[in-house]
């Protein structure tokens, strides 16, 4: 039962030993423990501040990335639009050039056909005139083969000249 009801001497010795322990703790351990706690607190504060800064930087970078992505999309859309316009322009120019070339070829073909037609008509006229001369020679040889026919023809021509 001594432990349940301590003696006055035991109480004093417990108080003295407790005071010595507290004094030793205050003198040698309390300051380093408090210093370690403060250092730990500062380290935690620094790390929290660094994490906050990193979070802000990450948010800024993400915003920058979103902005860059949006700008890249706009630039891509503009390039695609410009490429389509250039394609349409090139196609239209090619069509126009093809139409002009076709018109030129058709015009040249028409001129060529007209020239060949005129040449053919001239050739036919020349052949007709040659045939006419040949036929006229043959007729004249036959008609004017005898002298009486020649005299009749000459008289008839003279009469026609007087009448006109």
Image (cartoon, grey):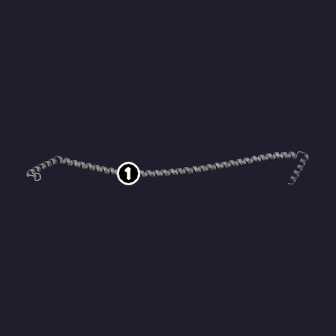
* Mark count: 1
Residue positioned 82% across, 46% down in the render: 135
Residue at horizontal 77%, vertical 46%?
A: 127
Residue at x 20% of width, y 48% of height: 33
Q: Residue furthest bottom?
A: 163
Task: Tell me: 60 left or right of 129.
Answer: left
Q: Quadrant of the C terminus?
A: bottom right
Q: x and y percent of residue 71 in the render?
A: 43, 51
Q: Is residue 121 left or right of residue 58?
A: right
Q: Residue furthest front?
A: 1
Q: List the single residue furthest toward the right.
A: 148
Residue 83 position, x and y percent, is 50, 50
Q: 87 and 7: which one is in front?
A: 7
Query: In the rendered view, does 80 fall on the left or right side of 163?
Result: left
Q: Residue at x 56, y 50 (%)?
A: 91
Position of residue 42 measured from the top left corner of the image (x, y, whole percent): 25, 49
Q: Secondary structure at mark 1?
A: helix
Q: Nearer the viewer, residue 153 or 62?
A: 62
> Is 42 in front, or is 30?
30
Circle 1 residues within 10 Å: few <14, some 14–19, many ≥20: few
Q: Which residue is mark 1?
A: 62
Q: Position of residue 154 (x, y in %)?
A: 88, 49
């Amino acid at each position: 039962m001594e432990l349940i009801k301590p003696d006055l001497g035991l109480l004093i010795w417990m108080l003295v030993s407790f005071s010595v322990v507290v004094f030793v703790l205050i003198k040698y351990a309390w300051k380093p423990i408090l210093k370690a706690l403060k250092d730990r607190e500062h380290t935690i504060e620094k790390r929290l501040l660094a994490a906050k800064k990193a979070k802000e930087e990450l948010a800024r970078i993400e915003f920058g990335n979103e902005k860059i992505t949006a700008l890249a999309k706009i630039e891509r859309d503009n390039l695609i639009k410009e490429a389509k316009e250039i394609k349409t322009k090139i196609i239209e120019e090619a069509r126009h050039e093809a139409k002009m070339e076709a018109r030129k070829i058709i015009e040249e073909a028409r001129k060529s056909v007209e020239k060949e037609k005129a040449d053919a008509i001239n050739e036919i006229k020349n052949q007709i005139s040659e045939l006419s001369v040949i036929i006229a020679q043959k007729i004249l040889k036959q008609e004017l083969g005898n002298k009486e026919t020649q005299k009749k023809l000459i008289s008839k021509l003279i009469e026609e000249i007087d009448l006109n």
